[in-house]
Image: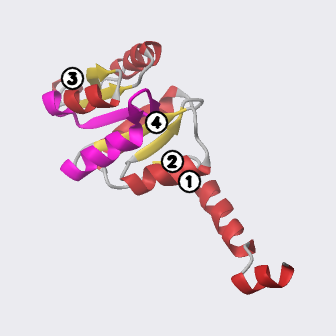
Amino acid sequence: MSDPADQAKVTVLLIDDHELIRNGLGAVLDLEPDLEVVATAGSVAEGIQRYHEVRPDVVVTDLQMQDGTGLDVVRTLRKESDKVGLIVLTMHSGDDQIFAAMQAGASGFVGKDAPSTEVIKAARHAAVSPKAFVCAGLVGAMMRRQSAESTALTEREHDVLL
């Protein structure tokens, strides 16, 4: 029987402009025997550069940063590889952000208010299924979008009301 420590770990790059988040999340992920944070970055530009240096299995990126967005990271890296897992981590977790992350090519979307276990699950998922999108709030967002679309007025209905 093989020792789990001998198996290759999922390597992770963390991109967030807050050092506390990078260090805290990094410490949490490093506690997992199958995950290893191999690099961190504090900006979009630095994150993309670090990705090219270390080629991690998974990138966890904040949505809003000083020099751009996590969606910039996702779009750039997804164009380069369909094998890298891309997780968007944000405190701005509305429906629009969820759909934007999915459309950009993210593997997952996690709100910063979620338990750390959600980020761990998303990272593991992204490592094995980088093109399949996961988000705890996706079903609700889809239902709200469908409901909004079904109650939207047609062009003719709008004209009649004016």
Q: Determine contact: label 4, label 2, CB under 8 Å.
A: no
- Residue 82 in the image, given as x and y percentages of width and height: 23, 52
Mark 3 and mark 1 lie on one chain; the one further toward the N terminus is: 3
Q: Is residue 73 above or below residue 24?
A: below
Q: Amino acid at mark 3?
A: Ala
Instruction: Specify which label sits upstream in the sequence, 4 or 2.
Output: 4
Residue drawn at x 30%, y 43% as measured from the top left? 85
Closer to viewer: mark 2 or mark 3: 2
Asked if residue 144 lies left or right of residue 128, the reply is right
Which residue is drawn at the image coordinates 56% and 53% (left, top)? Answer: 138
When the figure is inspected, residue 109 is found, relative to residue 66, above or below; the finding is: below
Residue 45, given in percent of the width and then of the height, sits at 28, 30
Mark 2 and mark 1 residues within 8 Å of each other at the beta carbon? yes
* Numbered badge on residue 63: 4
User: Which residue is tagged 3?
Assistant: 5
Whether residues under marks 2 and 3 lie with C-beta atoms below 8 angstroms apart, the answer is no
Boundaries of the magenta span: 51-80
Q: Position of residue 153 (x, y in %)?
A: 74, 77
- CA gap, disc 3 to disc 1? 34 Å
* Residue 133 on image: x %, y %: 42, 53
Residue 69 falls within the magenta-colored stretch: yes
- The quarter holding residue 144 reads bottom right
User: Element type at marker 3?
Assistant: helix
- Find out whether residue 55 is within the magenta segment: yes
Q: Where is 31 relative to 4, above or below?
A: above
Tag of residue 135: 2
